[in-house]
Image: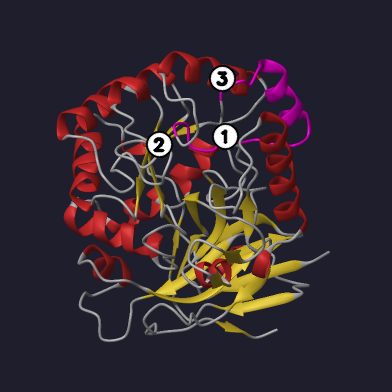
Amino acid sequence: MEKLVIRNIGQILSGKLEEPVFDGDCMIAIDGKINDWGHEKNLDCDAATTVVDANGVTLAPGLIDSHVHPVVGDYTPRQQQLHWIDSTLHGGVTTLISAGEVHMPGRPKDVVGLKAMAIASQRWYENFRPSGMKVHAGAPVIEHGMVEQDFKEMADAGVKLLGEVGLGTVKDGKTAQQMVSWARKYGMQSTIHTGGPSIPGSGLIDADMVMETGTDVIGHINGGHSALPDDQIICLCESCKAAFEIVHNGNERAAVLTVNTARELGKLDQVILGTDGPAGSGVQPLGILRMIAMLSAFGNVPAAEAFCFGNGNTARQRKLDTGLIEKGYCADFVLLDQAQHAPGKSMLESVQLGNLPGVGMTIIDGVIRSERSRNTPPAHRLPEHIA
């Protein structure tokens, strides 16, 4: 039995909007799953195989990037960059979700080829986890000519996602809605491109098509890069039960508009975060942390709640077993603290002022994957692996 004990925690962020901060100073995981938490004096910390002294820093569920475009391994040809996934881990992200492997050179667009690539993509990230990162990949872009059997075959082979609707030849709501329905029938979750075109072959996807298509996630509701007009974003927030995905590579003003509208509608639980990288804007290892700080500062969201946009909300919308402090969930954590010399009386207050925290450690499945981040500003305090 592998037993992880993290003691001397300053505060525990839960990932849950309804109770964003849990009471306690200790976390216990057994065989990679959360087992118990609370005050150390009340917990069974004996027989630990790994002990971490948090030194008073904050523990949060590992962050989730809901919108990435991986290709193969830890390499992106879009920016000719190696180890972008490892760099993202150093930004506190422990799970990545593909919105389509669209930057694969020579990406097949025939039905046989796109199915083959989707299955292969799912397999290679299932078999190879860069730096321990969880990469949910194999997200085919739908094309004309696909039939229901194609979705069944992919689902039977382990494919659980659709790439962004609208990046392929299917650009009308009726056809897209039919294919999304087939995908949903076989347990595949769908995302739609929202806003102006981002790559050659894509096009404008407006609010009418988003609503007609009915995907599970409104991909980059703040544009990737160009956002829809304000009235269309507000309409989507008012009309849709899907997740409102806000991305780093989108329009920041539209991001704040989305959060403000969601708050007014009582729909903050539908807000999730992504980066939409690697793409033309490059790779953003700190993109999710930046979005949390930006939305907290300019969206007037308490920082503890803004963190939920980057883990717990996504976990619930995406039906994942990570991103929440919940018994039996994966022991995926980020330990962070206020950056050195950053204004604010605490880590959360500093984030709400728009500052990035310093990441001191990431843990995936109960295993320490990185210690002091090479990408965030240096934290005031650092956790220590003591046994």
Q: Circle 3 sits on which residue?
A: 179
Asked whether the beta carbons under mark 1 and mark 3 sit within 8 Å of each other, the answer is yes
Question: What secondary structure is found at the residue carrying circle 2?
Answer: loop
Q: Residue 193: which disc?
A: 2
Above or below — where is 188 with respect to 93?
above
Residue interval drawn in magenta: 144-166
Q: Residue 162: which disc?
A: 1
- Choose between 194 and 103: the one closer to the eye: 103
Residue kind at label 2, given as amino acid type? His
Mark 2 Cα shell of 10 Å, populated few (<14), some (14-19), many (≥20): many
| Lower position in the chain sequence, tag 1 or tag 3 | 1
Q: Can the viewer see residue 20?
A: no
Hey, which quadrant is residue 371 in on the image? bottom right
Q: Residue at x 16, y 34 (%)?
A: 230
Q: Residue 60: which disc?
A: none
Mark 1–mark 3 Cα distance, whole angstroms, equals 10 Å
- Choose between 299 and 153: the one closer to the eye: 153
Where residue 153 sits in the image (x, y, percent)? Answer: 76, 26
Where residue 54 sits in the image (x, y, percent)? Answer: 52, 77
Where residue 303 sits in the image (x, y, percent)? Answer: 29, 58
Question: Can you say which quadrant of the picture contains the C terminus?
Answer: bottom right
- Choose between 97 and 266: the one closer to the eye: 97
In this rendering, would 385 be left or right of 304? Answer: right
Mark 1 Cα shell of 10 Å, populated few (<14), some (14-19), many (≥20): many
Q: Residue at x 46, y 69 (%)?
A: 91
Above or below — where is 8 with respect to 76?
below
- How many marks are shown on the rendered structure? 3
In this rendering, would 345 be left or right of 91? Answer: left
In this rendering, would 106 be left or right of 66? Answer: right
Mark 3–mark 2 Cα distance, whole angstroms, equals 15 Å
| Lower position in the chain sequence, tag 3 or tag 2 | 3
Residue kind at label 1, given as amino acid type? Leu
